[in-house]
Every structure is written in structure tokens, then in C-alpha cells.
Image: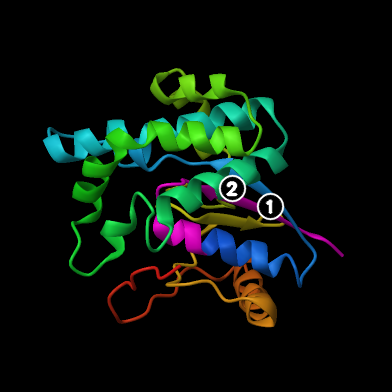
Amino acid sequence: MTTSVDFWFDPLCPWCWAASRWVLEASQVRPLAITWHPMSLGILNAPTEPNETVEQFSELARGPIRVLAAVNANESNERVAELYTALGTRFHHTDHGLLAPIRRPDGPGILEGMIIALPTSQPLIEDALAETGLAADYAKAFTDSSWDAVIRRSHDAVPAGAQRQELIGVPTISVEGSAALFGPVISHFPTGERAGALWDAFATLALEPTFFELKRVTDRPIPLD
């Protein structure tokens, strides 16, 4: 029996990238039907009071996900997945990814690193559109703030069960329409049956209505892949 999986993502997040690769690996050994949904860290983290650094990040972070929202509105979900893979590879490749410096112990902080890197991201998006055979005109969504309302509607579609919805970030995953979970936050993605076993554990918790949260008593790991 195929399990439906709704996965909210932002291509900028390295932990979300690792989790997305894990879910794709799990789908090779478990019958999963994955639907990809845009979620914007720029919108979620928009400052509620004056803060120049956060304001810069909030605006810069919206460009890539606007492009994915435009593709999501007009193309199949498979095309969204293809573009996410093409963009994520360009952003997060260990050696030459645009955002690789923020994953290094001696690199800049996440916000600072993205503020440095994101002004040069548009050519990478154009390259990813070309690689996946999508229309170059989608790149225009990068600076089109009208897509922010579409992204907010995607946020609103995250199921919360009987609770009040409070979005944390990406990845956010719903299994069979259940109340969505933030995470898992993983340092690298397992493959093969390890990916399937992690999925089994995650799905069990996701479908358990009494489950709320787990956290390790350690620092968050830096993604490796």
C-alpha cells in the first residue's frame, strides 16, 4: 500500500536538503508517493521589529523559493522535484555549492553566509531551469513579490490536527495527511534499507496522535551531504 507524503521545503536549508535526499532514498525501498510544497524561510523569519540583518536575509531568501512556487503552480510535481534537485545540488554540494561555506565549522553564520551568497544565486537558478528543461521565464519570479502570497497559502495548507498551527521551518512533513512534523534534522542521509528503517520509525511517530517532540541533548550537527 502506497503511503502519501507531503514535504514542505526551502532549497536554501542544508538540513532540509539532507532530509529530502533521505525521503527520496526511502522511496526506493518503501512505497511512498511524495508531494513537494514550497515553504519560505524568508517569510517565516521576517522580522517583527527592526533588525537589519534579519531583514536582509528575509528578502534575499525569498527569490529561489518564489521560482519554485511558480513552477509548482504551473508544472507537475515531478518537475518541482527535478528543479529542487538541480537547485539543491548547486546550493549544497560539499565542495563547490554556493552555500557550502555555512556548513563548515570555520564558516560564517547561517544568516551572514546567506546574505553574502544569495545575491549571486540567480545565475544558478537560470542554469537549473535550463538543466531541467523548464522555461527560462520562470527566473522572473525571483523578484516578483506576488508569489509570496502563493507561498503563504502553501504554509497555511500544512495540517496541524487538533492543534493550532505553528510553523517552525523546513523540513516539515505530513504522513497520510496527519499533523505535520518539523524534521527530522539529520546530518547526512542514509541509503538503502537504513533509509527505509528511518522512514518506518518516523512514520510511526508521525501517525501516533499522542506524539509531540523528540530532541537530542547535543548541538545540532552540520549537514555533511
In the rendered structure, does residue 3 fall within the stretch colored magenta? yes
Residue 219 position, x and y percent, is: 27, 76
- Residue type marked 1: Gly
In the rendered structure, does residue 162 fall within the stretch colored magenta? no
Where residue 2 sits, quadrant-wise, is bottom right
Residue 88 position, x and y percent, is: 49, 50
Whether residue 123 is visible = yes
What's drawn in magenta, residue-wise?
1-18
Where residue 214 sits, quadrant-wise, is bottom left
Judging by the rendered image, the residue that carries numbered circle 2 is: 159
**Looking at the image, which residue sits at the far right?**
1
The crowd level at tag 1 (other Cα within 10 Å; few <14, some 14-19, many 20+) is some
- Residue type marked 2: Pro
Whether residue 153 is visible = no
Local SS, label 2: loop
Q: Residue at x 49, y 24 (%)?
A: 139
Label 2 – label 1 distance at C-alpha: 7 Å
Q: Please tell me which of labels 2 and 1 falls first in the chain.
A: 2
The crowd level at tag 2 (other Cα within 10 Å; few <14, some 14-19, many 20+) is some
Say above or below: 109 vs 214.
above
Indicate left or right for 83 with 184 as reference. Answer: right
Judging by the rendered image, the residue that carries numbered circle 1 is: 177
Q: Residue at x 44, y 26 (%)?
A: 148
Where residue 21 sits, quadrant-wise, is bottom right
Say above or below: 47 vs 171.
above
Quadrant holding the N terminus = bottom right
Instruction: Tell me if label 2 and label 1 are in contact, CB under 8 Å.
Output: yes
